[in-house]
Image: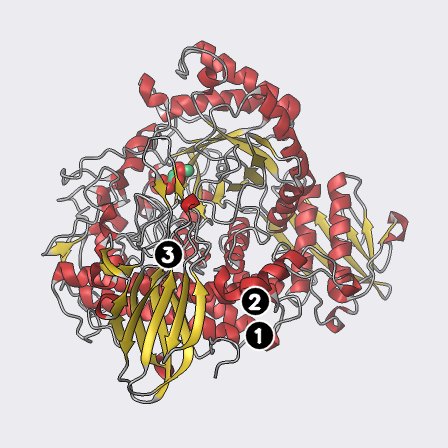
Amino acid sequence: MRRRIGNTLRAVLYLSAIAMPGGALAEDGSAAWLRYAPVAAAPYAALPSRIVVAGRTAQEKQAGEELRRGLSAMLGRDFPLVPAREAKTNAIVIGPAAAHFAAAPAQNQRDAFTLDVKQVRGKTLLAIRGSSPQAELYGVFRLLTEVGAEHRIAAHQSEQASAAIRWTDEWDNLDGSIERGYAGRSIFFEGGHVRPDLARAAAYARLLASVGINGCNVNNVNADLDLLTTEHLHEFTRIADAFRPWGVRLALSVDLASPQTVGGLDSFDPADARVAAWWRRKVDEIYALIPDFAGFTVKADSEGRQGPAQYGRSPAEAANVLAHALAPHGGVVLYRSFVYNNYLDWRDPKADRARAGVDNFARLDGVFAPNVIVQIKEGPIDFQAREPVSPLLAALRRTNVAIEVQTAQEYTGQQRHMVWLPSMWKWVLDTDLRADHRSTPVRDIVVGRAFPLSDGRPRLGGFVSVTNVGREANWLHHPMAMANLYGFGRMAWNPALPLAGILDDWTRLTWGNDATVDATIDAMQLESWRVYEGYTGPNGMGTLTNILGYHFGPGIESAERNGWGQWFRADARGIGMDRTARGTGYIQQYPPPLAARYESLATCPDDLLLFFHHVPYDFRLHSGKTLVQSIYDAHYAGAREAASYETRWLALKSRMDDGAKDERFEQVLALFRYQAGHAQVWRDAVNDWFHRVSGIEDARGRVGHPSGRIEAEAMTAVGYQPRAVTPWETASGGVAMECKLAVGCSLATTLDRPAGSYAISVAYYDTWRGASRFELLLNGVAVARWRADDTLPPAQFDAAPDGQTAARFTAHGVDLKPGDRLVVRAVPDLRPELVEPASDGTPRDFREYATVDFVEVVPEDAAPHSETERLPGKK
Ligand code: GCV
């Protein structure tokens, strides 16, 4: 991604830490939606300038300071904090206030606040009151949002959090790496310890609090085995201290083998009294250090983690041991239902990973301790571009549950593609599971209202987002990805909120209040999940990425014929998992009305079809199209939409406020360009694969006949040699050309296009570590140069040309005439240090061979955008 913005952006990023003239700081994205950029002040002229903090707690003082800072910056006048005696008139009062108002939220209410505006003897009083100091802080952030998004401040507003659990999970390891983290290293850990500087941790807690998130589990659910040593616990107190002012409680993921690995016992059997005693002592030790510790998250008997199964015990027996230790302190256990066998027999037509949640947990309904919450991923597999809702959510009627979603875009573009996931989450939360033949939408289940306690009170429950922020300035790498975290917090607070309002608030707070800017960004984000789904995994097939490795680019058949159970069972005749009663029986895990809907081809929705049914490629969808034609069309439409982001974005530049239009603007532009190219990689891989497997032609003649494409292997090569690419669908025709000569190589062709302006794309592979240099020449004159030095997501080092490393460079506005000679010249990166010895004796070879797949020449007016990308000085 660096190549397009190159040195300029690097210099700007460096300067971003440096104060600008006038005291303003250049914006690098770290402020996220808390930028407090100036707004139109006139509508708020009547807002009192003085702020009174009526309460005495540190949190209320913090709330006052936040309000002062935010309002002063946005409205351009001072909002001093003044003593309580001045609270009578013309003031904003935070905390227990003012005789003039009706009752404040009761203290036993969960996180509730009110905002009230009153005229008293010609003066204005605005009271922000809450059920706790923490709730007052939420009220302050709400007022700041109203002003920042230029909303009218209503005379009375009253809100309450939907559920007690509103957490993020961070999959950070003590060594500083992050599992599925796409924005740099951990803000919490480095080298086996808590980092000395926790300023980012504190800043993160502020962001979380601003959208109502009240808990943060800081370490990987694949927990370090020595996490619970006394030394580490002392270090964790510093993270809890950094979180506390913002009301974010620290939680930890623990490995159930800790009584052995840390405690030195010879067992971690939950039924062993010594094990239970060890957990009690350990939990007491934690609470002595961190009195507001939130609790534990547990991943066990899953993906290589040990668990109670090895002693013949159930998840409930294990969870309850921890729960009993935590209960006296008010802590909770989030026990993950992500328990499945990753050595399934793919030859067995009845084997089905999707069944695992209900098969393992439904029989335990009612036996979990009251402070255990079963944490359920939204779908039965693993955060794919689309899955049906997990049936376990309807199967646990006497158990607390929370839903787990993934802000970290593991299968949805890894924060290099813009995908606004709240659209997906809303679809999940609104799904009515029809338990007991009544309305039981997922949102009512996870807030504990669909299956309440016997006395009618809602169960404990809520929302968990796997977020994985990193040390990069803007937390999640893609500035647009921050809308996912924002959306998660707002949805967890109130899952009934309309999506458009949540998103529009984020857009306004992040990019300013210009109407065109907001409408454009909102529209792009709102459609982005559909767009991504369109060019990746269709009709409930899963994301179609390389599931054995990076989970990023296409790698279609990696899902088949292995123990991981993400199969789609394609053959020449048809495709899809048969999960009907005749098949694996998974559909019967849903309550009968939903099961009936999914079981019948007449009622099964198109977008989940292949998750539930095995059908022929020419199966007619409800849309009227055949399955395969619908896939072809969706991939062209999705890639076209993704390509439109760049043009739509460029049109906004002049309208952005000053803070938005510098490096953040350029960063998004570079990412949109990358996404446009990678969406085409996806489109071609998936369509070519379906074309080959089904043998059915695209009715519109596009698949297999790309317009304007010249295969690299068909060009005149000097030095370049052909190589097969694996998987085959990630190179056009399965073959690319690579260069192993230090002096460089070239590919040439003579064009016969009618005279006009063209976009010329070069499809190449940008593998890990290497930085090959490319040049595009027309009649011997360079029209573009670039380096293959993108910072692709760090899921896994990838030195191969494949779906993850496939990239595009496009030069726009190139004037051509018949007979022009086009040459791609490249110098590979063969530095000896790119070959590393490895512990297992097989060297890791990261040399990069400037591999080229094809060149595409299309008339500029048919190209997705028109911005000219030329060398300086060239026409
Ligand atoms: C933390 C998927 C991911 C793993 C993750 C696991 C989980 O399998 O690929 O990286 O491990 O889910 O949620 O536990």
Going from N to C along the chain, the mark reached first, 3 or 2, is 2
**How far apart, in angstroms, are the residues tagged by discs 3 and 2?**
37 Å
- Residue type pointed to by label 2: Phe
Secondary-structure class at tag 2: helix
Q: Residue 770 at x, y = what percent?
A: 42, 52
Is disc 2 surrounded by few (<14), some (14 to 19) or many (20+) residues within 10 Å? some
> Farthest residue toward the front?
743
- Residue type pointed to by label 1: Lys
**How far apart, in angstroms, are the residues tagged by discs 1 and 3?**
41 Å
The reply to whether residue 498 is in sight is no
Q: Residue at x 31, y 73 (%)?
A: 856
Whether the residue under disc 3 has CB within 8 Å of ligand 1: no
Secondary-structure class at tag 3: loop
Residue closer to the observer: 852 or 589: 852
Q: Which image quadrant for residue 736?
A: bottom left
> Farthest residue toward the bottom?
755
**Left or right position of 824 against 348:** right
Going from N to C along the chain, the mark reached first, 1 or 3, is 1
Q: Residue 73 at x, y = what percent?
A: 75, 62
Is disc 3 surrounded by few (<14), some (14 to 19) or many (20+) residues within 10 Å? some
Are dots 2 and 1 in contact, CB under 8 Å?
yes
Q: Quadrant of ligand 1?
A: top left
Whether the residue under disc 2 has CB within 8 Å of ligand 1: no
Secondary-structure class at tag 1: helix
**Which residue lies under the disc numbered 3?**
742
Going from N to C along the chain, the mark reached first, 2 or 1, is 1
**Which residue lies under the disc numbered 2?**
665
